[in-house]
Image (spheres, rainbow, N blue to C red):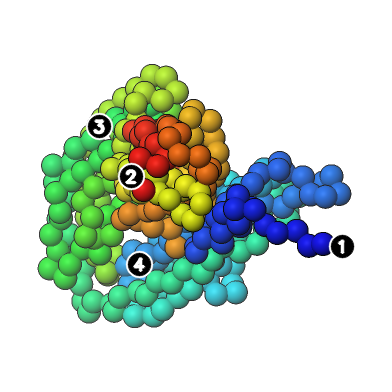
Amino acid sequence: MRGVTPTASSRRLLALCALVLLTVSCRWGGQDDAGGERPPGAPTGVTAQAGSARSVHVMWNRAAGSVVAGYEVYRGRTRVEQVPASTHMVDVTGLRPATAYVFTVRARDADGRLGPPSREVRATTPAAARADTAPPTAPGALEGRAAGSRAAQLSWTAARDDRGVLSYDIYQGTSKIHSVGGNQTAAVVTGLRPGTRYVFTVRARDAADNLSQPAPTVRLTTADGADGGATATAPTDFRAAARRSGGAYDIVLSWTPPRVDGTVAEYEVRLDGRPVTSLVYGGEAPRDRATYRFYAGEEAGVTHRVRIRALLPDGTWGAFSAERTVTTGSGG
């Protein structure tokens, strides 16, 4: 019996599946081979950042798979927090100063089954400041604007502290919804409802856990509709080019990920108006510049339209990038 020689097309598809740090996610529904519901998948986009000398802020993206009932956060092998499915962040407190910690997150379904752990993330708490009881000054000049129907952009001027600001806590009304590093003075809040009025403020925190007074509140109303042109959640500086590879052509994409709070670990690529693949970063997702290439056939002179969008950390799709047109054989 004669062996089968792979065609150029099959070789290209195999190469595509072997891209470093990138997997192509093919969703076949939420059932296993026996017809039962699968447990949830591993949460992606997990990050950990010291919030003070005795706390670490852990954040993650919504887990895929069956319906998620909640999440469990682990410090090493010890479960330290349990939160409902609507929560994608937690402050782990009671830690030791100047200590390195490892965190993972697991999703749990309504039957109590746990999905696999996320990748490990590490954070080191700073040394405790001696006899520091003075809080930072309040952040100033807080500004905000709606970014479409489901997001808001916030910015503020830096607070001052005699030992240094370690983090900023962001509040929606009276509820803390996120924390960013002390070197950041802007954030994009996602997961909002269309046509809804919101009130935000920001407070600064130092290593001794002293919390500033809140910045003056900012009020805004999200746009009506399902999209509302939420350009703040769209990949920017999107570029596409056709490149010859052997006897075939690839389309090479590059873009800057949207600047949202949390990690964007998944994208949808649309070619000629139709979804062609979902890209899921299994390791560290790019934050500054992302690239991807995929097989486009062997024929020269074929024109394609391509654009992408990001799955945001709260589980909603962001806005589409600008659409680009490429023609095979036109310069690659």
Residue behind mark 1: 1
Residue under the image location 83 percent in, 50 percent down: 33
Query: Does residue 133 appear in the picture of this structure?
Result: yes
Residue under the image location 35 percent in, 40 percent down: 330
Residue behind mark 3: 145
Residue behind mark 2: 331
Provide residue 146's location: percent of width, then percent of height: 29, 30
The Cα atoms of the two marked residues, 2 and 1, are separated by: 43 Å
User: What label sits on residue 158 in the rendered view?
Assistant: none
Provide residue 262's location: percent of width, then percent of height: 40, 52
Neighbours of disc 1 within 10 Å: few (<14), some (14-19), many (20+): few
Work out whether 16 lies above or below 233: below
Residue behind mark 4: 50
Neighbours of disc 4 within 10 Å: few (<14), some (14-19), many (20+): many
Give yes or no for contact between labels 1 and 3 (Cβ–Cβ under 8 Å). no
| Local SS, label 4 | strand
The Cα atoms of the two marked residues, 4 and 1, are separated by: 62 Å
Residue under the image location 45 percent in, 23 percent down: 226
| Local SS, label 1 | loop
Horizontally, residue 303 falls left or right of residue 216, namely: right
Closer to viewer: mark 2 or mark 3: 2
The Cα atoms of the two marked residues, 4 and 3, are separated by: 28 Å
Give yes or no for contact between labels 2 and 3 (Cβ–Cβ under 8 Å). no
Q: Is 105 in front, or is 239?
A: 239
The Cα atoms of the two marked residues, 1 and 3, are separated by: 68 Å
